[in-house]
Amino acid sequence: MAVDQYETEIDVRLRDVDFMGHVNNAVYATYLEEAREAYFADVLGVSLTDVETVLVSLSIEYDRPIEADENVTIALEVSELGTSSVPMTYEVRADGETAATARTVQVLVDPETGDSRPLPSEWRSRIESSRSA
């Protein structure tokens, strides 16, 4: 998977490492969340803490362990948009090598009803602009 639209670096913390000396598999989901937060801030100009989105889907395929001393980068891409959803594909890289690939779907919801609501046109424009950059 060649994902190169947006990249962010992730710090491997001591608490991320399991008794075998690698990043615990469950921590990868947190790394994806950190990358999503950075993407929303940098591309959409909003914080995930300030918008009503929910994660409705998460899948991760592990290719190799991440060692405690490796540099981790998350590359992500939004190649398509739904009416209310932002599907993202990811490549988790450790020292430049693919450690995992993943996919998530975030859905924008109405805070009063809990129902999905359409993505703002500004988000669509910014995502489209970031793709062509």
Image: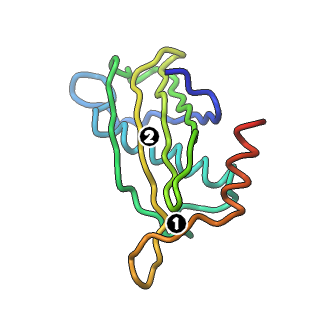
- Number of marks in picture: 2
Residue at point 39% right, 25% down? 100
Label 2 crowd bin: few (<14), some (14–19), many (20+), radius 10 Å: many
What residue occupies the far front of the structure in this picture? 83
The x and y percentages for residue 27 are 34, 39
Name the quarter where the C terminus is drawn.
top right
- Identify which residue, 45 or 23, lies in the foreground: 45
The x and y percentages for residue 3 are 56, 27
- Identify which residue, 39 or 10, lies in the foreground: 39
Q: Tell me the residue that label 2 is attached to.
A: 31
Residue at point 28% right, 39% down? 26
**Callout 1 amino acid:** Thr
* Mark sitting earlier along the chain (1/2): 2
Quadrant of residue 106 within the rendered picture: bottom left
Q: Is residue 42 left or right of residue 78?
A: right
Q: Tell me the residue that label 1 is attached to.
A: 49
State how far apart marks 1 and 2 are (Cα). 16 Å
